[in-house]
Image (spheres, rainbow, N blue to C red):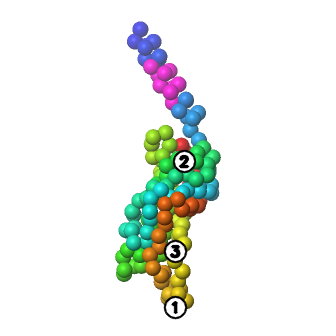
Amino acid sequence: MKLIKSISVIAVICACVAALSANAATIPAGTTITVSTVSLVTSQQAVGSTFEAKIAKGAGVLKAGTKAFGKVSSSRRNPRKSEPLSVELISVEVNGRRVSVKTNTVEPHGPPQTARQAHYGHTAGTTVVNPKTTLQFQLLQPVTL
C-alpha cells in the first residue's frame, strides 16, 4: 500500500514538473527589448540605483506592459570619476516573479555639449531621462521564463 502511495506522489510531482516545463519559454540572446521608463532617471543618481520601466513592444513571450527593472551603470554623481549616464536592464517580472536578465548598457542622450567639453570628454549638465522615455536594450544571454 505504501508503495502505491509513493508511486502516486512521484507521478503527481513529475506531472507538475512537466507542466511547468511546457509553459517555460526561452528568449534568445540578441533579442531587442524596448522599454518605456516609469520612473525618472538622472546622471546625478548613484551607480547601482534602480529604476522601473515597462515593456513597450512585446518581445516574444514578454507582453507589452510587463514590468521591467534597470539600474544605473555609470553616472556623474562622483565628481572624481564623472562618466556619462548609462543604464541596463536587470530583471523582468513574469507571473509575479522577477527573472534576471543581462543586457547591454545604453547611454540616453542628454543636453548638448560645447565643443571644448566634447574635446575633453566631459558631458554638459545633468542628463535627465523622463518617465515614458523609450529605450532599447539587447539581451546578452538567453532568458528562460
Q: Secondary structure at mark 3?
A: loop
- Amino acid type at mark 1: Arg
Q: Residues within 10 Å of mark 1 (few under 14, many from 20)?
A: few
Outermost residue on the top side: it is 1
Q: Secondary structure at mark 2?
A: loop
**Residue at point 54% right, 62% down?**
133
72, 27: nearer the viewer: 72
Q: Secondary structure at mark 1?
A: helix
Task: Give the x, y percent position of residue 84.
Answer: 48, 75
**Can residue 128 be seen in the rendering of this structure?**
yes
Task: Check disc 1 and report the residue beneath it.
Answer: 116
- Amino acid type at mark 3: Gly
**Residue at point 41% right, 8% down?**
1
- Rendered-image quadrant of the C terminus: top right
Task: Check disc 2 and report the residue beneath it.
Answer: 65
Mark before the other along the chain sequence, 3 or 2? 2
Residue 15, magenta (yes or no) = yes
Q: Residues within 10 Å of mark 2 (few under 14, many from 20)?
A: some
**Residue at point 43% right, 14% down?**
5
Residue 103, magenta (yes or no) = no
Mark before the other along the chain sequence, 2 or 1? 2
Dominant secondary structure (helix, strand or loop) of the stretch shown in magenta: helix
User: Which region of the structure is painted magenta?
Assistant: 9-17
Task: Check disc 3 and report the residue beneath it.
Answer: 110
Which callout, 1 or 3, points to the residue nearer the camera?
A: 3
19 vs 65: above or below: above
Give how far apart the Cα atoms at labels 3 and 2 are: 26 Å
90 vs 98: above or below: below
